Image: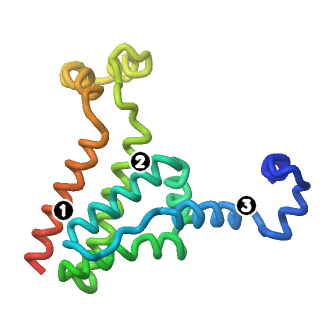
Amino acid sequence: MQRLASALNTAPMSLYTHIRNREDLLQAIASEILGGVPLPSADGPWQDTVRAWAGALRQRFLAYPFVGSLLQEGIATPAAWLELSNPLLQALQQAGLRGAALADAQRWVSRVVIGSVLMELAVPAAVPAEFASVARALGELPEASQGVWREVLPELGRHDDDAVFAYTLDRTLVALQALVEGA
């Protein structure tokens, strides 16, 4: 709170008239960030809404990487997350899902999107085998595993995060369609 007060050119105690504690501050930040995600309309096919929702969420998480840790701590789960999830739920309802299947699909899509973005943020686009930490880790693997990783590492830097995300989302939509048809 001291650093925040300094940044705002005020005293820490004056912040407490607006914010009770650190958790309230983080909740307000999460609400502001999640509340700023442009929500897609549900006018077109449900798949288009899911795709637009996932893309908007990904862009927001990439712009504000720390929001993932707020979700992990349970700070960003109240109203802002529920409101943000409405278009996804409506699209899945439009697809014909209800009850437990709807809840499972919402959880599944959210985790695929958030998990994909968190991996995108955590793993650099290129992981050259020359990095000391990678070389050290490779040395700790059994010889058979080292060979496989030596083959894969140079290729990891050749992917396009946008294409990987689109592919993951496409596969998720195919699986959702199968769920809808089986419901």
Q: In the image, residue 106 lies at what x, y percent? A: 31, 71
Please name which of the two marks, 2 or 1, marks the residue nearer to the observer: 1
- For the point 13% across and 61% down, the residue is 174
Q: Residues within 10 Å of mark 1 (few under 14, many from 20)?
A: some
Q: Residue at x 63, y 60 (%)?
A: 29
Q: Are marks 3 and 2 in contact (CB under 8 Å)?
A: no
- Dividing the image into 4 quarters, which one contains the N terminus? bottom right
In the picture of the structure, the residue carrying the numbered disc 3 is: 22
How many angstroms separate mark 2 from mark 1 (CA)?
Answer: 20 Å
Q: Position of residue 52 (x, y in %)?
A: 31, 62
**Image mark for residue 87:** none
> What is the crowding at mark 2: few (fewer than 14 residues within 10 Å), some, or many (at least 20)?
some
At label 3, counting other C-alpha atoms closer than 10 Å, the crowd grade (few under 14, some 14-19, many 20 or more) is few
Is 39 rendered above or below residue 103?
A: above
Say left or right for 11 vs 66.
right
179 vs 82, left or right, is left
* Depth order, front residue of 30/138: 30
Q: Which residue occupies 18% across, 55% down?
A: 170
> What SS does tag 2 mark?
helix
Q: Earlier in the sequence, mark 1 or mark 3?
A: 3
Residue placed under numbered mark 1 in the picture:
173
Task: Look at mark 2 in the image and give the residue it sits on.
Answer: 118
Element carrying mark 1: helix
Residue lying at the far top of the rendered structure: 130
**Left or right: 29 as drawn, with respect to 172:** right
